Amino acid sequence: MHDVSTATELAVPKPLQALLGGIGIALAAHSLLVFNGAVFGVSGFVHRSVRGDKEAGTALLGMVLGGVATGFLGDKDTMSTAASFPWVIVGGLLVGIGTKLANGCTSGSLVATMTFFTTAVFTTQIVHRGDLPESAQADWSLGGQQGQIYALGAALASLWTLGKVFGQSAREELQLPVSPLRFATSFLTAFAFGVSLRLGNMVDSQKVLGFLALPISGAFDPSLAFLAVNALPATSLLYHFARGNGQPRFGGKWAIPTCTKIDEKLIGGSVLFGLGWGICGICPGPALVNFGRALYAGDGIVSTFLWLVSMVTGGLLVD
């Protein structure tokens, strides 16, 4: 199922880029929570945008344009798909159905996370056995990705500047509506999140599948482990100690899912998500970023578009 054009190449782990990408992911997610009171769930954005949610649609636009920006800033890497078109469609459908069944909790519940990760590992071992390139010595350089770091910093700095200038007292004095600021938050955090995914190489399906191959395989790529080592603790620390006790700064209520109920939908949805992820090495966020990069490069548009359409279709089937 691999892309034969890349099968003979070695996979190069890029730990420093992954570490920085993890920090960017944590900061983008925290910023959305602080200003809009929302969690960063890309599958939820996709499903809600189909139903006409404008803030969710704005977030999707931000992620796609984040992908465009990485191309504009000189990203020369090509993100080849790890599956043929039929499997791309199957993978997208499974991810769409799975995330909708689990109600977006595939990333918010420990049980769901363990379920989809275990399923993805077994799927990768079966479907891509012998297909993945061997892992080479790690490259600890930035690899010319400085422009992405600047873009990430500029997006988040712009948002926090808006928050400083248009705080509650300033908005009341100027009688400014809060909606434009919430839309700006959705766009800027999604843009930063998308750039961070690319910086951390989570948009590369070969690296994702290499990580899911585990250290028992010569194809194991630890890059995503370095990303998680920074992203997960940083997100948790920011949530518990830097969120504040008041309302979201740009209005609205806290929209933080608890996902405490463990039922057949959560487990079944997580299994389906894991199957789809293990088949293609793609999930919603990286797919949106890759679509933006493909639009800029004029290459790889069809496969990414097929995956996204299949994911949306999967969610609609559950409806």
Image (cartoon, helix red, strand yellow):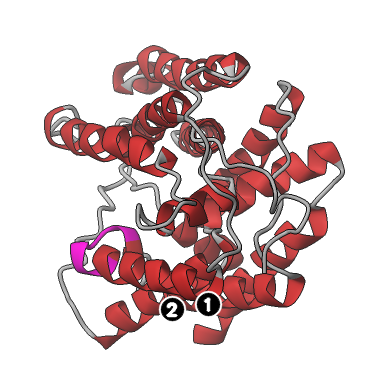
Q: Position of residue 135 (x, y in %)?
A: 51, 43
Q: Is residue 127 visible?
A: yes
Cβ atoms at labels 2 and 1 below 8 Å apart: yes
Q: Quadrant of residue 241?
A: top left
Q: What residue is rendered at 24% in x and 32% in y?
A: 234
Q: Which mark is residue 10?
A: none
Pick the residue in front: 104 or 165. Answer: 104
In the picture of the structure, the residue carrying the numbered disc 1 is 94
Q: What residue is rendered at 19% in x and 39% in y?
A: 236
Q: Tell me: 262 left or right of 304.
A: left
Which image quadrant: the N terminus?
bottom right
Total count of labels: 2
Q: On screen, 2 above or below 102?
A: above
Q: Per the image, is 317 magenta?
A: no
Pick the residue in front: 171 or 115. Answer: 115
Alpha carbons under labels 2 and 1: distance apart? 5 Å
Pick the residue in front: 47 or 144. Answer: 144
Q: Position of residue 228 (x, y in %)?
A: 32, 41
- The boundaries of the magenta stretch are 107-112
* Disc 2 residue crowd, few under 14, some 14–19, many 20+, Cα 10 Å: many
Circle 1: element type:
helix
Q: What residue is rendered at 51% in x and 72% in y?
A: 276
Q: What residue is rendered at 28% in x and 53% in y?
A: 255
Q: Per the image, is 111 magenta?
A: yes
Q: Amino acid at mark 2?
A: Leu
Q: On screen, 137 above or below 123?
A: above
* Disc 1 residue crowd, few under 14, some 14–19, many 20+, Cα 10 Å: many
Q: Main secondary structure of the magenta part?
A: helix
Q: Quadrant of residue 303?
A: bottom right
Q: Quadrant of residue 4?
A: bottom right
Q: On screen, 230 above or below 224?
A: above
In the picture of the structure, the residue carrying the numbered disc 2 is 272
